[in-house]
Amino acid sequence: MIKPNGQSSLVRLIRPIAILFAAMIGIQGHSQEKLRVADALPVGHYISEYAAKFWMQEVTSRTNGSVQFEYYPAEQLGKAKDMLSIAQSGVADIAYVATSYISDKLPLSSVAELPGSFSTSCEGTLAYWKLAIGDGIIAKRDFEPNGVRVLFALSLPPYQLLTAKRKFDSISSAKGLKIRIPGGAALDAMVGALKAVPVRISSPELHESLSRGTIDGLLFPYGSSITYDLVSLLKYSTIGENFGSAVIVYLISDARWKKLPPETQRAMTEAGEAATRRGCSMMDKDVDSDAVKLRKGGLELLALQPTMRAELAKINAAVSQEWAESLDKRGKPGSEVLRAYRASLAPSR
């Protein structure tokens, strides 16, 4: 018998069971998904700290903890040159890709590596970003055929020419130098135009290559030369120039993307925009302080004379034109992408 303002013994027995059952249903409805993120960067690299880790944290926060990540830096899941296939095959759900390492598969992305294109990371990053997502021409012609999509992207601060022994104080002074490039037709053409010898070496191999004299110098941003502990092996660097750049993207395969709930896709997209803008902004802020570190490490930073800069500007223009025309001849829209990239750069200047 149920009392007027009380509970029957049956209700008192059923209520705890019902609460437990509801809690179990709630846990199942809030199931966590763990995604593997792979990159080739050393632990503590500024790209990881400024963008990759931030992006993961943002996605976890925006999904109320339902998406978690396992992070594998420093080539734990594969070499830098293999990162695209790692994402495509599902060895990792998300992978870092330096587009210059696989310029044969992502040729149009080299447009953001062309010398003389921009003066800050954010200029280059945001121009490239517009073309690499959504219906952008690089999204459609580089990434879509490879079955992947960009989650966030960065153009590194403009590369400087850093050398171990010879000072770059005239265009002819580069002649014969073995200059490291990460890859890509744009940087290859740039070094060739200086009558130097381009040598393709991945970033993790640079310290050993400089130590052994395999290379005489490299095209690199200041921050990366510090991260890879190269300062003690170098003597000279340009300052305020743009000898090209590198594009870094974090990718997910289309197949994996389609399996994610719409709310997770939305969180990743929003976090990607935030990580892209945050990453380039923080890299730009570091340039001046990194220059101070290089000077303290014994490097002489060389501001080029106006006549040298004018010569370089002509070389840069010729390299860009050559890059576009070579792709056109292969049936790729090189000239179209170059025009689109320059148009995308214009509003940010």
Image (spheres, rainbow, N blue to C red):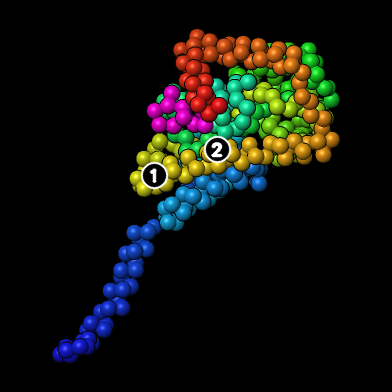
Image coordinates of residue 96 in percent, x first then y, are: 55, 37
Compared to 130, does 277 lie above or below?
A: below
Tag 1 secondary structure: helix
The residue carrying mark 2 is 96
Instruction: Give coordinates of residue 111: x percent, y percent.
Output: 55, 21
Please identify the quarter of the rendering in which residue 224 is found: top right
Q: Can residue 196 be seen in this view?
A: no
Q: Is residue 336 visible?
A: yes
Neighbor class of circle 1 (other Cα within 10 Å; few <14, some 14-19, many 20+) is some
Among numbered discs 1 and 2, the one appearing first in the sequence: 2
Figure quadrant of residue 285: top right
Q: How far apart are marks 1 and 2 (CA)?
A: 20 Å
In the depicted structure, whether residue 128 falls above or below residue 310: below
Q: Does residue 345 sit above or below 37 in this rendering?
A: above
Query: Contact (CB < 8 A) between labels 1 and 2?
Result: no
As drawn, the label of residue 266 is: 1
Q: What amino acid is found at the position of numbered circle 2 in the picture?
A: Tyr
Magenta stretch, main secondary structure, is helix
Magenta range: 126-137
Q: Could you tell me residue 108's position as x and y percent?
A: 51, 21
Look at the numbered disc 2 and give the secondary structure of its residue: strand
- The picture places residue 137, in percent across and down from the top left corner, at 43, 23
